[in-house]
């Protein structure tokens, strides 16, 4: 059953997702050659706890960290590592929080320094596919319209959609009904209604779509070693259209798009 949220519940979810967006904006500014994903994880956990929230992923089915930090061919669920990032890497940062009983969940993929043009295209197309998917979250549409929008845009640009991992409902629990694949035919599945809230998360590869899980039992990588990107927003269906609950603030968006030197990561 798909749970529909009341207006007060949506406001609680907006606060939780706003915190996630703020932390991700801060982490984006810290990504640079020489910085490790373990350092990013420490920054994220400190900021979440200082805000009075709890990391949603840490301890979830035994997961050991606040962030999922997936580098290069890692698609999702990468465990933060002390290995420094290097120029030309890409890192997908996925995080969630629990605040006042409701979950926030969002993800971004960030280039480390300068990356090749085709890598830039991968990130751009994945983010565009998320935007197109969000546009489908309107009253009277169907769940399958969301994934169809992702698949159509991704494949038209020569990339591939991962099929093993999907988006999901979210609210008072991290994973609720329905599952939302990033592919498929439109016009199928449950009809969208006001108050539904979904975490939409395209995962896109530069090569083939197949993935495998490493021996750590968490990190999923592309089977062919190709790069992968992951973007995610938590979005509510409302009578006036989609409402992105994990949207960055205007200030964070401006910083994200500005050309500037990364800030330094605090050590210790």
Image (spheres, helix red, strand yellow):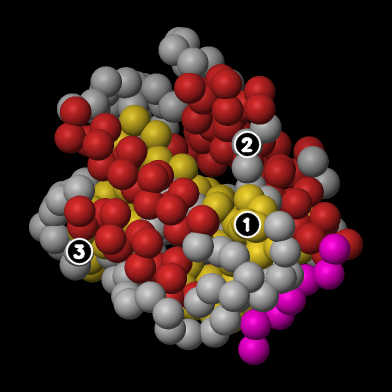
The answer for how far apart the CA atoms under marks 2 and 1 are is: 15 Å
| The image quarter in which residue 27 lies | top right
Which mark is nearer the camera, 2 or 1?
1
The answer for how far apart the CA atoms under marks 2 and 3 are is: 29 Å
Element marked by disc 2: loop
Q: Is residue 120 left or right of residue 22?
A: left
Identify the residue at horizontal 78%, vertical 38% (top origin). Answer: 50
Tell which of 242 and 103 is nearer to you.
Answer: 242
Identify the residue at horizontal 39%, vertical 45% (top origin). Answer: 128
Residue corresponding to mark 1:
242
Residue that protrudes farthest toward the right in the picture: 8
Of callouts 2 and 3, which one flags the residue occurring earlier in the amino acid sequence?
3
Residue corresponding to mark 2:
248
Task: Say if residue 250 shows up in the picture.
Answer: yes
Residue 266 in the image: above or below residue 139? above
Tell which of 203 and 54 is nearer to you.
Answer: 203
| The image quarter in which residue 83 lies | top left
Q: Which residues are magenta?
A: 1-7
Residue 167 magenta: no
Q: Position of residue 183 (x, y in %)?
A: 32, 70
Mark identifier at residue 5: none
Residue that protrudes farthest toward the bottom in the picture: 1
Residue 6 magenta: yes
Task: Say if residue 213 shows up in the picture.
Answer: no
Q: Is residue 160 left or right of residue 260?
A: left
Identify the residue at horizontal 57%, vertical 81% (top origin). Answer: 191
Name the image quarter holding the N terminus. Answer: bottom right
Residue corresponding to mark 3:
209
């Amino acid at each position: 059953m798909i749970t529909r949220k009341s207006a007060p519940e949506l406001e609680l979810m907006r606060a939780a997702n706003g915190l996630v967006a703020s932390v991700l904006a801060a982490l984006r500014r810290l990504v640079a050659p020489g910085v490790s994903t373990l350092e990013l994880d420490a920054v994220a956990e400190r900021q979440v706890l200082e805000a009075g929230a709890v990391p949603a992923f840490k301890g979830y089915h035994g997961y050991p960290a606040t962030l999922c930090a997936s580098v290069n061919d890692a698609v999702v669920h990468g465990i933060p590592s002390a290995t420094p990032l290097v120029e030309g890497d890409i890192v997908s940062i996925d995080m969630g929080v629990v605040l006042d009983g409701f979950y926030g969940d969002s993800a971004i993929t960030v280039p480390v320094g300068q990356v090749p043009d085709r890598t830039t295209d991968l990130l751009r197309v994945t983010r565009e596919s998320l935007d197109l998917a969000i546009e489908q979250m309107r009253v009277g549409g169907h769940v399958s319209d969301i994934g169809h929008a992702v698949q159509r845009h991704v494949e038209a640009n020569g990339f591939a959609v991962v099929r093993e991992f999907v988006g999901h409902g979210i609210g008072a629990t991290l994973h609720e009904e329905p599952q939302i694949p990033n592919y498929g035919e439109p016009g199928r599945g449950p009809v969208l209604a006001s108050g539904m809230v979904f975490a939409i998360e395209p995962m896109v590869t530069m090569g083939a779509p197949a993935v495998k899980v490493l021996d750590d039992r968490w990190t999923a990588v592309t089977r062919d070693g190709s790069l992968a990107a992951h973007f995610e927003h938590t979005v509510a269906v409302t009578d006036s259209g989609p409402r992105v609950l994990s949207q960055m603030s205007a200030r964070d968006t401006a910083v994200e798009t500005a050309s500037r030197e990364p800030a330094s990561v605090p050590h210790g």
